[in-house]
Image (cartoon, rainbow, N blue to C red):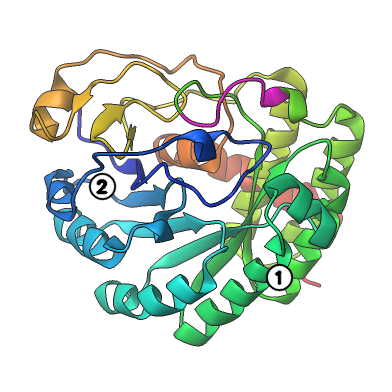
Amino acid sequence: MLSFPTHAIIAVTLNCNSRCVMCDIWKNKSHHELTPPDFLRLPSSLKDINITGGEPFLRPDLPEIIKNIKIAAPHARLVLNTNGFLPLVIKKQIPAILQIDPRFAVRLSLDGWQGTHQSLRRIPQAFHLVQESLTLLKKAGVKDLGLSFTIMEANYRELPAIYEFSRQQHLDLSLTLATDSPIYFGSQKQTLRPRDHQQITAIITQISRSRLRTLNFKNWYRAWFETKLAEYAQSNRRIGHCLAGQKLFYLDPQGNVYPCQLQSKPLGNLTKLPFAEIWNSHSSDFRRCHSCWMICSVKPSSYTYAPLIISQIITNKLQSPWSKKS
């Protein structure tokens, strides 16, 4: 019998108001989505939940969904990913969400400056809409606020500027590579990755060194993660075991439970079976999977291999000539 998962990626809809080149989710027409009461069936063991889409703010019942997620998993940290293209909807919904969970976290996608972000998201005024949503979220009182940057050939040279912007604005910044997924991002997305591995490694190293200057352990962890991301970009081999299907699962808007958002075979459906029955009836093992290096799948492994990772993080900090506080 498997122990219950601690991490989950929950897509509340696959409908999307963006047209991203690195993601085909917007091509979906998502119907018969889970209703708010369905989310009460989630396991209480969850400690970290990534709420995503599609675009989550397209669901008018999003506050009710989040309320029920919080009831089902009261100890979970909730992080919502948005493209930020619905500032008026965000302004309307976020106060109710913060009443449910004052620690609610939000990450907005930003893949470059004005023209670059607009060309990659293929939405007019994309950059300005993100800026407007950032301002609204800050005014509303969201404390855990950050940006997500998908690294591609078309935008990686702008990464240092986006990192500096996030630092000046006191925003978290998470990085990922364009990735294939038959049930999520689509195919042929890895062809969008940077071709000059040496240059992207140099850029990520620069950012990691900046993080190591601080006295913030979270920044040190990010520096470790990003260093390994650069290694993965060259080798396509994951560092350490993936615990998808053991500590992590992906829930799609129709209730299908998958080991993660990159695996196409569902374990069961939450509307038809209790979660415990779905979870304990499978024997999938993805420890040797190298399909991705994403923070959502790395986090569960980080808890499991914490002593080793912490020792590597401290070594990186001590060995860095830039380790003094700036």
Residue bearing mark 2? 46
Could you say which disc has been placed on residue 86 in the image? none
The residue segment tinted magenta is: 184-190
x%, y% of residue 283?
25, 13
Residue bearing mark 1? 128
Q: Quadrant of the C terminus?
A: bottom right
Residue plotted at (49% across, 55% down): 81
- Helix, strand, or loop for circle 1? helix
Disc 1/disc 2 C-alpha distance (Å): 35 Å
x%, y% of residue 38?
14, 46
Residue 79 visible in the picture: no
Residue plotted at (23% across, 35% down): 255
Residue 271 among those drawn in magenta: no
Which of the two discs, 1 and 2, sits closer to the camera? 1
Residue plotted at (91% across, 36% down): 199
Residue sitting nearer the eye, 19 or 299? 19
Residue plotted at (26% across, 35% down): 254
Please name the amino acid that badge 1 sits on: His
Residue sitting nearer the eye, 256 or 274? 256
Give residue 267's quadrant in the image.
top left
Please name the amino acid that badge 2 sits on: Leu
Give residue 77's quadrant in the image.
bottom left
Extreme-bottom residue of the structure: 139
